[in-house]
Image (spheres, rainbow, N blue to C red):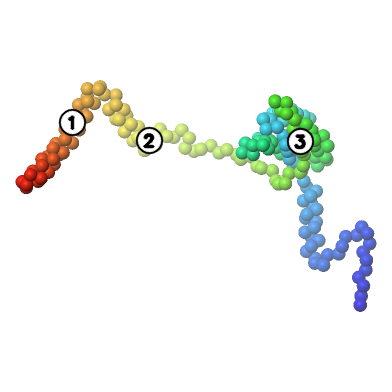
Amino acid sequence: MEIPFRRELGTPPASSSGCGSGAGRAREEKRAALSKVVVRRLPPGLTKRQLEEQLRPLPAHDYFELFSADLSLCPHLYSRAYINFRNPDDILLFRDRFDGFIFIDSKGLEYPAVVEFAPFQKVAKKKLKKKDAKTGSIEDDPEYKRFLEAYSVEEEKTSASPETLLGELEARARELTVPVLTLSQRLGQHRGGVFP
């Protein structure tokens, strides 16, 4: 029976499979590449400009975004800010300076900030706004032109004098009453025993 050797203190355990050591290296590189932090528990009414003034001088960064408080979380209304630093050494200095820093809102309430690494380290890309090709082209659209013509005809009818509108209504009423009268006469004759 063989007894396994004790490993020396400070040496990593031997991996039984060859692929395990590669995954460990990738994980270590990921940890070393953390550069985005989140500042939590900020006052709900804080604006981006006010936060920049309070954090001044802010080390070199390539991403800075403030997200206002979600009103559906009523008793826990806090804003949060995400900052991606270019230099990893600045993260420690920033954390030492602002972790526990007390922000005071306009009502005088105190909000101690919490600085930690962001759980999602990727930075959102700025979307380039493309110009819409159809902007300003509605006047050339044939369907819109037909709509304008129909709308102007209806507008002319509504802008007509009250006498002409009254005449049109009376004519419609006469058209409706004539068939109704003939129908009622036929029904009356039918009830009386006389068939047409």
Amino acid at pointer 2? Tyr
12 relative to 108 in the view: left or right:
right
Percent x, y for residue 86? Answer: 77, 40
Marks 2 & 1, CB-CB < 8 Å contact: no
Residue drawn at 10 percent across, 45 percent down: 191
- In this figure, which residue is indicated by the disc labeled 1? 171
Label 2 element class = helix
User: Which label lies toward us, 2 or 1?
Assistant: 1
Q: Which residue is mark 2?
A: 144
Front position among marks 2 and 3 = 3
Q: CA distance from mark 2 to mark 3?
A: 55 Å
Foreground residue among 189 and 128? 189
In the rendered image, residue 152, in percent from the top left (x then y), is placed at: 32, 29
Residue kind at label 1, given as amino acid type: Ala
Q: Is residue 2 left or right of residue 165?
A: right
Does the image show residue 93? no
Q: Earlier in the sequence, mark 2 or mark 3?
A: 3
Q: Quadrant of residue 40?
A: top right
In depth, the one of 83 and 107 nearer the eye is 107
Quarter of the figure with residue 173: top left
- Earlier-in-chain disc, 2 versus 1: 2
**Badge 2: how crowded within 10 Å, few (<14), some, or many (20+)?**
few
Say which residue appears at 33% left-offset and 35% top-offset.
Answer: 146
Q: Between residues 192 and 57, which one lies in front from this camera angle?
A: 192
The 10 Å Cα crowd at callout 3, few under 14, some 14 to 19, many 20 or more, is many
Query: Label 1 crowding class (10 Å Cα cut-off): few <14, some 14-19, many 20+?
Result: few
Viewer can see residue 14:
yes
